[in-house]
Image (tube, grey):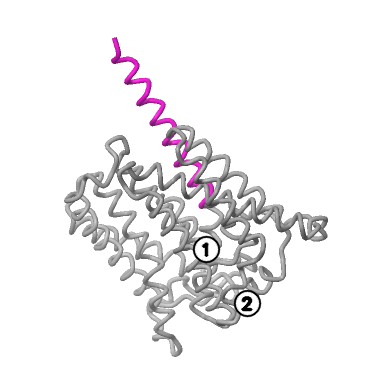
Amino acid sequence: MLVAYLAALAYGSLYPMQGWRPIGGSPIAFLTEPWPRYWTRLDLLANVVVYAPLGGIVVALLRRAELGSIRAALLAALAGSAVSILLESLQNYLPGRVPSRLDWIANTGGALLGALLATAWARQERRHPAWQRASLQPFDASLGLTLLAAWVVIQSHPQRVLFGHGALIDPPMLLHRLDPAYAVLAEALAAGGAFVTIGMLVRELHPPAAPRGLLTTAVIAAALLAKTLGAAWLRGPNLAFAWLSAGAQGGLVIGAIALALLASARRRARLRIAIVALLCTAALTNVFPVDTYHETMSSPSSAGAWRNFDGLLRGAALFWPVAALAWSIRRLAALRAEAGSIMARTP
């Protein structure tokens, strides 16, 4: 998780990683330069929020080393500060990116805030151990919940299809002339596949006694809200629901029906279904033609704080399918090992 977030953070901080140039002075000269003349509270908040997960992840790792809470939080803040200095220094070599001492301080504060929140959550988690399944390791549970939260957040970034992720390539020009009916079907299948993937992850994370249907609905609703708010922020309230195309509507219906039919499958079967649905969504997202909505939403925006998030969200959307696939394979291996252990103990 730490490696994936660092990669996404580097991608966002150095995006679009083009036009590298030499500089004449020291790359850390920004630490002693005057305060920036122009800054906004939204930009400051964005720099805090982006580094908060980093602090939380480092604390989770340090807890495994059995360090004290205060020491772990301070080391997490120090790690976040070091990462921020490195990335801010590299921004010197990119046109259009300006390193700032204020950004570094906000990043360090965000890492410390995330570390403190993670410490408080760990203490609260110990009071409610029944929330996790007995067969689910705490690390798997924490990582799974993080995947769900990250999936919701990346929906605020424009994608080619509803709930699309992992768009690594530009679609061939042939697909730009795809028949509209097939384009609607492709988007519906991609969105439905993502719906099923999330439903299966929720069912693997929570025990049968938990309201898993309600939890899945809440995650999907949160993702739709994130997409609506992102569209409204980028292009104004008039286009807040521009993402609700015919394909998107069909995908929500297909996903809900498919999940209702497949939810009663065995645990290992559900994970295999999640993997297949995940791969189908990623494949369809990569071949889907870039439509007018996506071009409009992806064009440069005047929202400065959004530009700070844009690269990070792009990186997270690229890495999320890989992380979800790895988590699902890990869970399959754990369940297979558990079944083998039970059979070995059976006389």
Residue occupied by mark 1: 155
Q: Is mark 1 on a helix, strand or loop?
A: loop
Q: Is residue 39 magenta?
A: no
Disc number for residue 327: none
The correct choice, above or below, for 2 with respect to 101 in the image is: above
Disc number for residue 300: 2
**Quadrant (top left/top right/bottom left/bottom right) for the C terminus:** top left
Of callouts 1 and 2, the N-terminal one: 1
Query: Between residues 89 and 51, which one lies in front from this camera angle?
Result: 51
Q: In which quarter of the image is residue 292?
A: bottom right
Q: Residue 120 appears at what percent x and percent y?
A: 21, 59
Q: Residue 206 appears at what percent x and percent y?
A: 34, 45
Residue drawn at x 20%, y 55% as measured from the top left: 124
Query: Between residues 181 and 130, which one lies in front from this camera angle?
Result: 181
Q: How crowded is mark 2: few (under 14 residues within 10 Å), some or many (20 or more)?
A: few
The reply, left or right, for residue 237 in relation to residue 43 is right
The residues colored magenta run: 320-347
Residue drawn at x 33%, y 20% as measured from the top left: 341
Q: Which of marks 1 and 2 is in front?
A: 1
Tell me whether circle 1 and circle 2 mark residues in contact (CB < 8 Å).
no
Residue drawn at x 51%, y 42% as measured from the top left: 325
Query: Dominant secondary structure of the magenta stretch?
Result: helix
Q: How far apart are marks 1 and 2 (CA)?
A: 18 Å
Query: How many numbered dots are placed on residues in this image?
Result: 2
**Amino acid at circle 1:** Gln
